[in-house]
Amino acid sequence: PLSSDVDLDMMEATPWTEPTSKGSIPPLNPTTGMSPFNVESSYDDDDDEEYEYLHCTTSGEHEDRRSFDDDDGDDDGVGTPMGLNRAIIRTPKFYTRRRYYILGFIALVIGAAFVAYVVVPTPKDTLSELPDNEGGEIVNNSGVKKIDEVSEEDDNNKVKVASESHLNDVVVMNAYSHDSTSFTQGLTYANGVLYESTGLYKESKVRRHDMSTGEILNGINIPKEYFGEGLAYYPKNNTLIQLTWKKRSVFIYDADSLQQLNKIQFQTGRNEGWGITYYPIMDVFIVSDGSNNLYFWDVVLMQEISRVSVTWQDGSPRDYLNELEYDPVTGLILSNVWYEDYIVAIDPTSGVIKTKFDLAFIWPKKDRPKTADCLNGISVTDKPGVFLITGKKWPKMYFVKLG
């Protein structure tokens, strides 16, 4: 090291030479004891390695103007003493950045997998129900007949489905075209007219169809901030009651003109509206909200009077109850189940599921395009025991007889 009593200004300068090759470490100036580069900066020789140099004070001590990873292994920021001609070689920036990129990518993949498989499970993975005991097979599903051509004894075009202790007959009787852009959320029938409620934000509608042809008679769009849901007809004042999904609003319309007459706020356990039907036995509306509860509402105030929990016959809950329809023949409440292609028949007094109708054969999932969603929509017709069913963005509606 240079002695502190040496007058640097009086020393004869030693000629300086550039590094002999690209990427080599330049020697220190023997006159000044310092790098030819700025002592507070690093020498970047473009080969992805960064060098930092110690410089000498007049006291002969080494001083580092920058923080650095020392070479004695303790990461305390103090390196081992070294001569003037020795450089500290830091970890290359390129390799440090690449390590961060790799670790970040791995963390992103793990996070995405956690969200996909833990936070947002597929609805079917969370269901609890009795195992399906489907017995029998489609006897003949090719010759679709009109309603008037099917008699009580007709066994053609019939699918036999065993549900628990029951053997249920599902007969497809007729079909007609349906708007495949309609995200059907509710169907109901009255006086020769089929009413339909559709969903999705900015696309929700209420429509009137000719029951015999399926032709759209008239319709309205609901405000774009609402997601339309279930629909019910109230015969005492010829009105339609439409639920909305998360806005907790009920729209009331004149059943003929579809003019909005009122809007009422509602509450359920989940504060969502899914399905609704009129239950004349008690003069109430029965409402679902995607849970396993059915809510009994006052027909004027749209407020809960009571509720019942829906279960399979073994007592396990059946949630994701969706579109509802009262069956005047059996007195049961028919319900779609979200993401399932079957209908359950519920005792409204006990909440116990009496029957399960499997309709998966009508339009199997494997045959549907990605734009078509699950079975949804049930309506009575003017034929006792015959119902009109469809699905979200399905191209057809089907008349079916449920045994």
Image: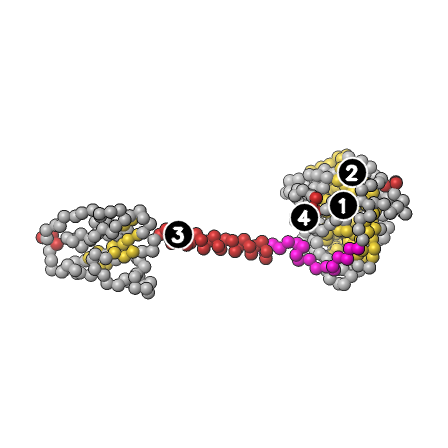
In the rendering, at what x and y percent does residue 390 appear? 75, 44
Q: Amino acid at mark 3?
A: Arg
Q: Vertically, is 193 above or below 340? A: above
Alpha carbon of mark 4 to alpha carbon of mark 1: how far?
A: 28 Å
At x 77%, y 35%, the residue is: 215
Side (left or right) of 113 relative to 102? right
Q: From where the camera sits, is residue 203 visible? A: yes
Mark 1 lies on residue: 362
Q: Nearer the viewer, residue 76 or 258?
A: 76
Q: Nearer the viewer, residue 139 or 372?
A: 139
Q: What is the magenta range?
A: 119-135
Q: Amino acid at mark 1?
A: Ile
Disc number for residue 176:
2
Q: From where the camera sits, is residue 263 visible? A: no
Q: Residue furthest bottom?
A: 74
Magenta run includes residue 21 = no
Disc number for residue 97:
3
Precedes in sequence: disc 2 or disc 3: 3
Mark 4 lies on residue: 245
Q: Amino acid at mark 4?
A: Trp
**Dot 4 alpha-carbon crowd within 10 angstroms: few under 14, some 14 to 19, many 20 or more:** many
